[in-house]
Every structure is written in structure tokens, then in C-alpha cells.
Amino acid sequence: MWGTAPRNLPKSRFVTYISNRVRQMRELISAKNLHKSFAELHAVKGVSLQVNAGEVVGFLGPNGAGKTTTMRMLTGFLDPSAGSVSLDGFSLADDPLAAQNTFGYLPEGAPAYPEMTVREYLQFIARARGIARREIAGKIADVAGRVHLRGVLDQVIETLSKGFKRRVGIAQAIIHDPPILIMDEPTDGLDPNQKHEVRELIRTMGSTKAIVLSTHILEEVEAVCTRAVVIAAGRVVFDGTPEEFELIAPASVTRNRMDYVFRQLTATAAEVAQ
Amino acid sequence: MSPWRVILRREFRAYFATPLAAVFLVVFLFMAGVFSFSMGGLFERGQADLRSFFQFIPWLFLFLAPALSMRLWAEERRLGTIEILTTLPIPLWHAVVGKFLAAWIFSMVALALTAPLWFTVSWLGDPDQGVIVAGYIGSAMVAGIFLAIGGFVSALTKNQVIAFVVTIVACFLVLLSGFPLVLNFFRGWMSTGAVDAIASVSVLTHFNSLMRGVVELRDVIYFASGICALMVATTFVVDWRKSA
């Protein structure tokens, strides 16, 4: 909550940073035994997640399983009741600003300030992230090209369609080219063409970054993710490749095999929880 | 650019992106005129000063400052943008201070637009300029303390109307805490020392001494410490309730 913004990392931190890099071999996200309790509800019950550079993790689960809560704890928006998060070697609890400097975040529903134009909004985010003034115009042009926002840069966000708003949300998350990307339902509300474009973008970025995205669409996991993590009733019930996920279904199931596995995994967890 | 300046700039422009700025300025200037001329008798008093203008300023800000402050955090939470703002790599207090300063500077713009009144009085007579400067400082301080209260209340809710109404009530109590209306309520069941303490936080008492042209250290400390304390409290409340 207090402290100063990480404009230039002091030497001691720089040394920690390098040694952490070497030790962990690019383990970018490390969440250990996360718990979150709200007044009456124990929403997340011991979720651990390690993500390396080059991995795209599809975060699956029924509504209310704790996906959004977990992602909010990964970004520091929610403080975990127990457990710890470390991002690119920086502890979110001890060094929040350095940790938050390592990721881009697309929250649920892709919120943005409705009265600003896309350009003004991206300028605001770039400045707040401490990007040098002379680089900002170039970064905006680059990111607008990647998510196809060039035509609407000077439109007010309020007047944009749902698909464009979602892309504005993605643009603000990747403008500083972070090593980590955390996206809550990045393709929700997009038409099939737009979904395809966003998936292409994620796949391209996935080769160098650690990406966690949540989704309801199982085909999406097959299409873009290198790894699937299924969460049900606040617990991780599956962590493996999409192929391994599909293989859980018996050979007798020939159609919608992923749907079948998803139902099996989440139904059992819900029963155990009750 | 420091993070607080980035926030300040965005918030200040946000006022002008909606009709709020224009409506606020027109209402403020119109009411200031009505109060000074009709009720304060600026001309009839036959004295070259702005007393009849300044004496209504706290009452004007009582209703108008909450209109500026109500959106600061409530809207952020309603839109969900608070999730982006609080996960940016900037210290939370930068956001709190930046937002407050945007509202405060806007209220100073409104005050500056009343300068023609000052010029007119200076042209018609020979007013004590020091008293007028002290009056403007006092007015800015009252706006500051009200906006700081408003920002704090706005951090507690996602409903701007609730933020507006609660802020008016809170500002009213702080404004009049030195007066019998409020003090009599406490006098029955609190010690004399406690009642004196409540009386000493009255905005009006401190404003009146500034309006007389006396810029005293304790008045300045009063306003400055009040605003700082509210900034700290707002930072804690935003952190505590950001996801609520």
C-alpha cells in the first residue's frame, strides 16, 4: 500500500532479481496454497499454481468455482487469507509494486473509463506504468496494430461495441510487453471472427510469456492452451495438458469428450464439498 | 511524470469530459452572485470588501463540493476500473492524493472565476487586499476539507447518490460543530473537555478567523492536518474495501 513506484530498481533488488531468474529458470508465476474466505464463504481452498515462460494455462471451472477470486489474488487485487504469490521472483506481499510491474491484467468484463477515447486511455495506462514519454506514441501504435484498434483510436470508449471494448482491455494489458499475462475471460462476448483473432494473438505471445486465462469454452483450451487447470468448489481438480484432460474420458465416449470430462471432474468436487 | 500526477491529470480531464464541469461552474457562479448581491448586500453595505461574498462560501461548498467528490471512488468501483487502478504498479496513496487534488484544483478554478467580483470592488473603492487574499485562502481550505471528507465517503460506497447525501451530512456536522445546534446535543452526556474538542474542529470557526484577514498558523495547521488525516484514512478504506 505504501512505498514508491519502481521506476529504477535499486541495485540490491537488481541482484535479487537476477539470482531469482537463474534459480527458478523462468518460473514466472508461483502461487502456493492460496486460500480466500469471505464472510460466510470459503471460496478458494488451497490452490497452488506454477507457470513457466512459454506456457498458456487455461483456467477452467463452473461459475462460482473460484476462478475470478484466484486471478484476483494473483494480481494483488484481493489479499489471500492464507498462502503466497510470487511473480517473476517478486513476492506480491513483500514487494507489491515490483511484482505488479511484471504482469498485464484483463479483469472480468474488461472495465475501462467510458468517457475517454481509446488513445487517451492507453496513454493514461502507459504513463501510470512509467513508460517514457517519447516511447508512448510508438507503443500505442504497435499495440493498436496487434489487437486491431487502429480505426477506433480516437473514438470514445463508451461508443464502442463489446468486441472493441474487450480489445481495449487486452491492449491496456499488453502495452508494456509484460512477461506475465492474466486474463479473465478474454474472449467472452466476442463473435467467432474476433475470438479467432484473440486466440491467434494469445498463441503468438504464449511462446515467450506466462499466460493464465480463464474461460468457459473447452474448445478454447484445445485451441490455445498448453495446459489446462480445472478448479471446482475452490480446489484444483485437474492440472495437465489438454490431451491428458481428454484422455480421462473412457473410449466409449466418442462425442464432446472434453465436456464429459469437465462434468465428471466438477460434479465429484461439488459433491465432496457438500 | 509521478504516478499521482498521472492520476490527477486523468481525473481533472474527466470532469470536463462530462457536463458536470459546466453545470458546476454555472451553478457555483450564479449562486455566489445571488448570495453576495441579494442576501449579502454587497452594494448596499457601501463598503469596499468581499465579506458578503465570503460569508456564504462555506454554505455554497456544503452542497457543491460533494457533487465533485461523490464520483471519485464510487464510480471507479461501479465501473470495475478500480480493479485495474489498484493493480497498476503505483502506490495506492498516489491514487488517493491524485484524485483529491484533481477535485481541489477544480474547485479553485471555480473560485478563480469569481475574480471579476474582486476587480469590481477594487475599481469602485480601496479594499484591504490582504483580507481578500486571506478570504480566498480560507475558501480554498474549506473546499479542500469538504472534498477530502467527500473522497473518504466515496471510497465507502459504489453508489454516488449515497456518497453525495452522506457527504453533505458529514460536512454539515463538521461545519457547525462549534455551534450550539451541534454542541447542545453532546453537552448533556459528554465531559466539558470532550465538548471543547468537538467545538475546536468546527470549520466555520477557523474559516471566520481567516475571513477577518488573520492568517494564523493554527488555522492553517487545522486545515492541513485535517486533509492529511483524511487522505490516510481514505487510503486505508480503499485498500480495505476495494473489492467490495
Image (cartoon, grey):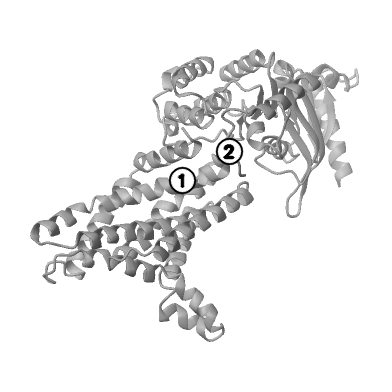
- The residue labelled by disc 1 is B99
Left or right placement of residue A9 versus residue A22 in this view: left
Identify which residue, A221 or A14, lies in the foreground: A14
Residue at the extreme bottom? B188
- The residue marked by circle 2 belongs to what chain? A
- The residue labelled by disc 2 is A4
Looking at the picture, how far across and down is residue A267, in whole percent?
Answer: 84, 37
Left or right placement of residue B190 versus residue A207 in this view: left
Q: Residues within 10 Å of mark 1 (few under 14, many from 20)?
A: many
- Please name the residue shown 83% across and 26% down the image: A239
- Please name the residue shown 35% across and 60% down the image: B61
Compared to B22, does A222 lie above or below? Answer: above
Q: Is residue A48 visible?
A: yes
Mark-to-mark CA distance, 2 and 1: 18 Å
Q: Secondary structure at mark 2?
A: loop
Q: Is residue A218 visible?
A: no
- Please name the residue shown 48% across and 57% down the image: B163
Residue A203: which quarter of the image? Answer: top right
